[in-house]
Amino acid sequence: MLGYTIRRILQIIPVLFVISLVVFLMLHMIPGDPVKNMLGINATEEAIEAMRAKLGLDQPLHKQYISFMKGVLKGDLGTSIHTRKPVVQEILDKYPYTLKLAVGGTIVATVFGIIFGIIAAVYHNKFMDNFIMVLSLLSVSTPSFFLSLILMLIFSLYLGWLPSVGVKSWAHYVLPVITLGAQSVGIMARTTRSAMLEVLNQDYIRTSRSRGVPERIIIYSHAFKNALIPIVTVIGLRFGGLLAGSALVETVFAIPGIGRLMVDGVLKRDYPVVQGTILVISATFVIMNLLTDLLYAVVDPRVKYD
């Protein structure tokens, strides 16, 4: 497994390099001048050119990219054009909020998605199965911003049970976590159902039933354990997706996370902030994929890494 892990880690390097290059080029293709945004419309051309030279934006693109990558190799993601703070510090300050949302959303999606998926598989082609599949389709199809507004309207405005914005206490995370994990519940339920149905149709399951093994033991001890590989895969992918897709939820609920930092950076043409946040999110995503692959051998002893 050690050799496989080392190879996968080495594969992460070119992936992050390509991502950084694509993001760098796309940012410079977006209309707008970060210096003009920072200095305002009344700034003179001399002041704009002086600031552009100070920030290194007057250099050719390839030199700007090389300078950025040299800083990355040293652990320096640059300095924010607008706040003049190190991007690394900005990310460290805001990353915990996004991480809490992603972890919470993943837990909600995993617990409810697996429970609903198992129930749907056990009652295949019956009312409960059809009902859960309709709910899954509804959860996947509901936009996050619409669901967040509905939850705020019901639980904050009408009932007054939960706060709507901010991160002062654990209660402030309830609505954002539910919003972030709701779509993934449907995906997890459908994946669990498909994996469970495939296992439940195997010969050894029918043999266990013919031997009088209790259905509860068949479902949870035999079928579910052998259906974990696709479920674990979806959990890993959804965590990365929730981490990268938290920007909208953070904006709606006024959470100062890394997603909101990235959106503000795009609006202000703050190149170092956008490049740094996307690079960190991408690194987290590929690392989660690596951990998911390594987890296969834990949940299924038949998986071997040579």
Image: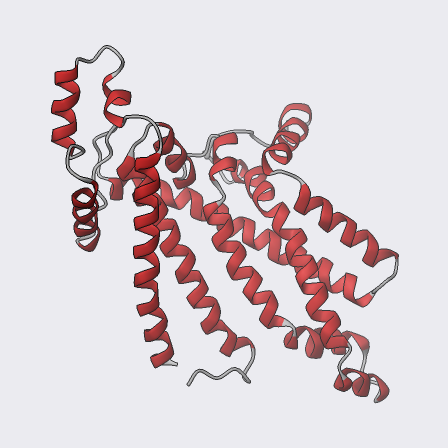
Q: Residue at x 21, y 37 (%)?
A: 79
- Residue found at the far top of this picture: 42
Question: Would you place residue 262 above or below residue 100 in this image?
Answer: above
Question: Would you place residue 258 above or below residue 113 in this image?
Answer: above
Question: Would you place residue 104 above or below residue 10 in this image?
Answer: above
Q: Which residue is drawn at 56% across and 30% down?
A: 163
Q: Where is residue 226 in the image (x, y as percent from the top left)?
A: 65, 77
Q: Where is residue 42 in the image (x, y as percent from the top left)?
A: 23, 10
Q: Which of 142 and 53 is in front in this view?
A: 53
Tally of numbered tags: 0
Q: In this view, does 83 lie to the left or right of 188?
A: left
Q: How is the image coloured?
A: secondary structure
Q: Which of 179 and 63 is in front in this view?
A: 63
Image quarter in which the C terminus is found: bottom left
Q: Which residue is drawn at 37% across and 71% down?
A: 8
Q: Position of residue 165 (x, y in %)?
A: 51, 29
Q: Nearer the viewer, residue 4 or 149?
A: 4
Q: Residue at x 75, y 70 (%)?
A: 197
Q: Where is residue 246 in the image (x, y as percent from the top left)?
A: 49, 42
Q: Is residue 214 left or right of residue 32?
A: right
Q: Quadrant of residue 221?
A: bottom right
Image quarter in which the N terminus is found: bottom left
